[in-house]
Image (spheres, rainbow, N blue to C red):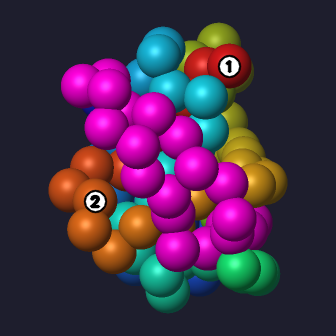
Amino acid sequence: MIMTNDSGTTNCDDWMVDTGAGVHVRTDETAFLSMEKDTLTFVGWKGDVSSSEASGLVNISATDAVTGCDVTLGLEDTRYTSKGTTNLLSLE
């Protein structure tokens, strides 16, 4: 798990690094810098088919482990779901 701070907010959020996820998933609609309706469907790890409500750009702040500097990561095509319990950071 990594801790991040969304750009423009003072809240620190948890993100789970998910090696099996094909997309980033965010559960807080207010964290999106831009958003559009999403038509993508995907299969969950239990075989269930679902879709996200929207997709867009989310910025997260992290610390570079080598330099110790703060960096901002722009996660394009991040899926939004209001029913999610965990933010997912895809490594694909």
Q: Is residue 10 above or below residue 62?
A: below
Q: Position of residue 4 (x, y in %)?
A: 43, 50
Q: Secondary structure at mark 1?
A: loop
Between 6 and 52, the one lying in front of the other is 52
Do the residues under discs 2 and 1 have CB atoms within 8 angstroms? no
Q: Amino acid at mark 2?
A: Gly
Residue located beneath label 1 in the image = 92
| Residue shown at the point (61%, 20%) measured from the top left | 91
Q: Position of residue 67 (x, y in %)?
A: 68, 21
Q: Position of residue 28 (x, y in %)?
A: 40, 75
Q: Residue 46, which numbered label? A: none
> How many labels, in total?
2
Q: In this view of the protein, can residue 33 be seen by the observer? A: no
Q: Position of residue 65 (x, y in %)?
A: 57, 18
Q: Is residue 59 above or below residue 34?
A: above
Q: Residues within 10 Å of mark 2 (few under 14, many from 20)?
A: few
Which residue extends farthest bottom? Answer: 30
Residue 70 included in the magenta stretch of the image: no
Residue 50 included in the magenta stretch of the image: yes
Residue located beneath label 2 in the image = 84
The disc, 2 or 1, on the residue closer to the chain's N-terminal end is: 2
| Residue shown at the point (49%, 86%) measured from the top left | 30
Q: Which residues are magenta?
A: 38-57
Q: Secondary structure at mark 2?
A: loop
- The answer to which quarter of the image holds residue 69 is top right
Q: Amino acid at mark 1?
A: Glu
